[in-house]
Amino acid sequence: MSPNQVIPVENGALSPIAERVLKVPSLTYDYGKDGIVIAVKADLIVRRSPFDASPPFRDALAEVADRVGSLADIKPDPSQRTHSPAGAAGGLAEPPDYDPGPGGELSELDVWRLKDPRTRNSIDESRRLRALVKEERVLTAKGAELSLPAVSPNHVAILSPAAGGCPAAPPTPAPPPDKGFVEPPVAAPGAKVTILDSGYIWIAPPHPPHHNLDGRVTVVLGQWLDTSSTPPTWRPDRPDGIYRDPAGQLDGISGHGTFIAGLVSHIAPDTSLEVVGLRNQEVEIGILNRAAQLGLFETEVAIAHAMLRRCDTDVIQCGFAFPTLDDYPSLPFAAVMAELRQPSAPRNGRVAVVAPAGNEQSARPYWPAALPDVIGVASTNRRGNARAWFSNWGDWCDCCTRGEHVYSTFVYWHGSVEGEPLSDIEHFRGWARWDGTSFAAPKVSAAIANVVAGSSGGTLPMDAWNQLIAGAGGVPVSSLTDATLSGPPGVPLTHLHIW
């Protein structure tokens, strides 16, 4: 069955970001209930064990694709491990990448590239090849069972995949705070949070910068996997910035990572921050002008790569949520989480990974939040007494907190914003309010970091999470049930009252 690339009119308009991403020639997509599955057209992710055990599967795969290499073998170029300067202060030194060594879970995943992506696509071929071999059931470190397919497309995550995407609506200007929002950086932070998002924007003169926040942040460039080169190469992503769409509007994700960095620092002042900017550069907005591009999406392989690469931290705040083909677990994220739960991994395998549930008003699982070893966060409304209108919700989530009308640091911008009429001129003075589960999840990351910092490092991050949901982490805890998405009797989630 070919990918369904017809979006029903009654489903409503897509976000401007989604409209542009779906036109990228190197991508393919499949429209389904509660989400649009987007994938790199030419790339397949293949698990080694079914490939070795099933000759029919192996032969059929080799007929249409060529092996690129395992995710463990494709190493980043050390010269690309660069970071942005921290304004006039000169920046913070970037720690080295984490290397899990050979023979780990990533060595069981191979990347294959279709021989003729003009006539074939990864969604069709994944479904056809899956029929030749059974799925495999594996246990996670948490003891939950996952059904893993033999092959999968390399899914794409964008920060605004649908009309109700993430963010759920454009940001709105907000006044500066009456008192300091972010405290000055501490000499010896008690915890570290790594943010995987759009990146961090240094505010240039003549505008007043966010001095205290700048002093807390180390910025690391993300990387995307170029499978068309020989050998395959990890290439640096574009840093976040004040990017404009073809109409001159501020693009819909500029400042997304900056907003989250400020939010984490506000709630958890005894922390240092590392922000990994993941903005792939393939969406052109000008004819034959490679400089006029918007980095609007990233692949699951690249995000999972960043997660493992920068896992020497207490909390990984992952800002992405995406649906997968036929709702199977994300293979790269499942492999990375298996690596991170090894006792030899940082923090004795107890690093906390937090991710938003997504904003499609759906009960369908979104990844990586739906993985048992990832803390998936849904959003309550502004009053904290019901599910936010945009939030995904289901028993695959772990908790909820308020993600509506959230206040934090933003950019300076005078003009219209993508997703609003051109006639609506906004004036941002470095502060904004925004809606989305991607603004609920950082609150949970910050609360975990607070518990770790308060113990002087004596509490491991996942133990800090267990303390939080048990009500022993200094955050009020209750239960909140939503029956509008999951049906009666509804799905209750742990409600963390983090304002």
Image: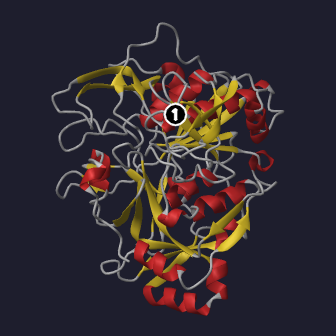
Q: Where does the C terminus fall, quadrant-wise?
A: top right
Q: Position of residue 377 (x, y in %)?
A: 58, 40
Q: Is residue 387 above or below residue 76?
A: above
Residue 485 relative to residue 193: left or right: left
Q: Give the quadrant of residue 256.
A: top left
Q: Is residue 399 above or below residue 323?
A: above
Q: Position of residue 115 (x, y in %)?
A: 39, 83
For the point 41% across and 13% down, the residue is: 176
Residue 289 relative to residue 166: left or right: left
User: How many residues crowd around disc 1 within 10 Å: few (fewer than 14), some, or many (20 or more)?
Assistant: many
* Direction front: furthest residue: 488
Q: Give the quadrant of residue 434.
A: top left
Judge by depth and name the residue closer to the eye, 362 or 318. Answer: 362
Disc 1 element: loop
Q: Position of residue 156 (x, y in %)?
A: 44, 58
For the point 21% across and 54% down, the residue is: 289
Q: Is residue 27 above or below residue 188?
A: below
Q: Is residue 100 above or below residue 109?
A: above
Q: Is residue 330 visible?
A: yes
Judge by depth and name the residue closer to the eye, 200 or 442. Answer: 442
* Direction top: furthest residue: 178
Q: Is residue 86 visible?
A: no
Q: Position of residue 452 (x, y in %)?
A: 75, 31
Residue 185 relative to residue 45: left or right: right
Can you identify the residue that label 1 sits on?
387
Q: Give the quadrant of residue 428.
A: top left
Indicate the amino acid at tag 1.
Answer: Arg
